[in-house]
Amino acid sequence: MRDVTRWLITAMCVFATGDRTALKAQQADPVYDEDSKLVNFVDLAYPPAARAGRVRGVVVVSVTLDDKGSVTAATPVSGSKFLIPACLDNARKWQFVPNRQKRAVIVYEFQIHAGVCHDRTSSVFLLTHHNFASIVSCENVIEG
């Protein structure tokens, strides 16, 4: 609550005086690709309830790293409320090369293709970049 109050006071001062420097100082520096080198990750299956509800989309998670590059905290930046919990749980299991900012960003993309799966739990996890994961499932299911 204290941080929110401080931010609001700063924002009001910025807009009242036209000085944008104070507001910019409170924003975090970007996490550059070269500072987010991956050591280890854990696959994530399409969350069953999200898949059944045909929820698709992108989830962005900001993670805090310790001195060894292990994730100590995961915070959602954006995404579906049906996908975020699984992504946060998954992100806490990743490890990066330690960086000076002690931060990284993970982007998850959930897709349902017009294909056929053998069961409802089938999905494919594909890491296409050091921090970009695609989780793909299919539209139709053939039991058996």
Image: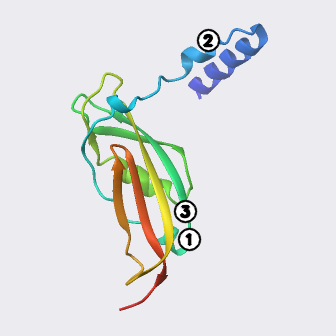
**Mark before the other along the chain sequence, 2 or 1:** 2
Residue 1, percent across and down? 59, 29
Q: Residues within 10 Å of mark 1 (few under 14, many from 20)?
A: some
Q: Is residue 47 visible?
A: no
> What colouring does the structure picture have?
rainbow
Tag shown at residue 22:
2
Above/below status of 97 relative to 7: below
Is residue 53 rendered to the left or right of residue 48? right
Q: Residues within 10 Å of mark 3 (few under 14, many from 20)?
A: many
Residue 36, percent across and down? 33, 34
Q: Do residues under tags 1 and 3 come within 8 Å of each other at their CB atoms?
A: yes
**Mark before the other along the chain sequence, 2 or 3:** 2
Q: Can residue 3 be seen in this view?
A: yes
Q: In which quarter of the image is the C terminus?
A: bottom left
Tag shown at residue 54:
1
Marker count (numbered): 3
Tag shown at residue 56:
3
- Residue at (61% x, 27% y) in the render: 4
Query: Which element is circle 1 on?
Result: loop
- In this view, which residue lies farthest toward the right? 16
The quarter of the displayed image where residue 101 is located: top left
Query: Which element is circle 3 on?
Result: loop
Residue 40, percent across and down? 23, 46
From the viewer's side, name the closer residue of 80 and 57.
57
Residue kind at label 2, given as amino acid type: Ala
